[in-house]
Image (cartoon, rainbow, N blue to C red):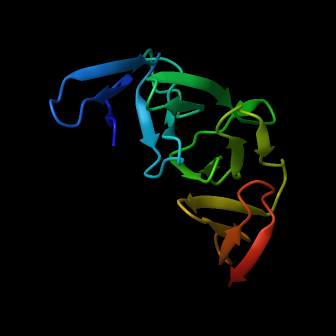
Amino acid sequence: DKVYAKTGVTESAGYAPVKGTELWTVKLPGPVCAASRHITADDKAAITYQPSTKKYQGCSDIAAIDLDAGKKLWSKTVNVGDYPVNYQNVTVSQHTVALGDSNGGAAFDIDSGKPLWQPKPGEDCYDSGYGGGAKLVAVRSCGDSDNTQLSIQTIDPTSGKVLSEYK
């Protein structure tokens, strides 16, 4: 209700909803790739972005933004082995930032940036995407490309524990 927030090429900006005047800008070192459609009750959101503008390096950086204060709370990168994971899917559920990719899902506490879960190398299954809001839902993919099995799971946003599953 206090801010209309949107992303630009290398920034996130907040505007007054009635007058349209700019309230704040959070500059980023590279292009924004994705932004959460959901926010926390205390107006925090998450984005993914590239670490620089020099060349396409993937969407490996994740940040939480306080939309009321107009500031970046933290920034993280997730690695599988020696390589950063490129996240195009980001959502928020309660106080959890969840990110999905074919390298595996990851989640962070939106307030502190503390990792809640991260991909494990060599897993046969991975969380390819998440849906947020009041509940956290994952699309889980298992098997190889010739024999893929999908399941939809409701997940506890803090622990990552599966609460329900539909195969």
Res 63 quadrant in image: top right
The residue drawn where x is 70% and y is 46% is 107
Q: Position of residue 2 (x, y in %)?
A: 34, 36
The residue drawn where x is 76% and y is 74% is 163
Q: Is 111 located above or below residue 154 in the figure?
A: above
Query: Looking at the figure, which quarter contains the N terminus?
Result: top left
Q: Position of residue 102 (x, y in %)?
A: 64, 54
Q: Position of residue 48 (x, y in %)?
A: 51, 36
Q: Position of residue 105 (x, y in %)?
A: 69, 52
- The number of callouts visible is 0
The residue drawn where x is 53% and y is 48% is 41
Query: Looking at the figure, which quarter contains the C terminus?
Result: bottom right
The residue drawn where x is 59% and y is 25% is 73
Q: Is 138 located above or below residue 123 in the figure?
A: below
Q: Is 11 located above or below residue 40 in the figure?
A: above
Left/right placement of residue 161 relative to residue 4 reads right
Res 51 quadrant in image: top right
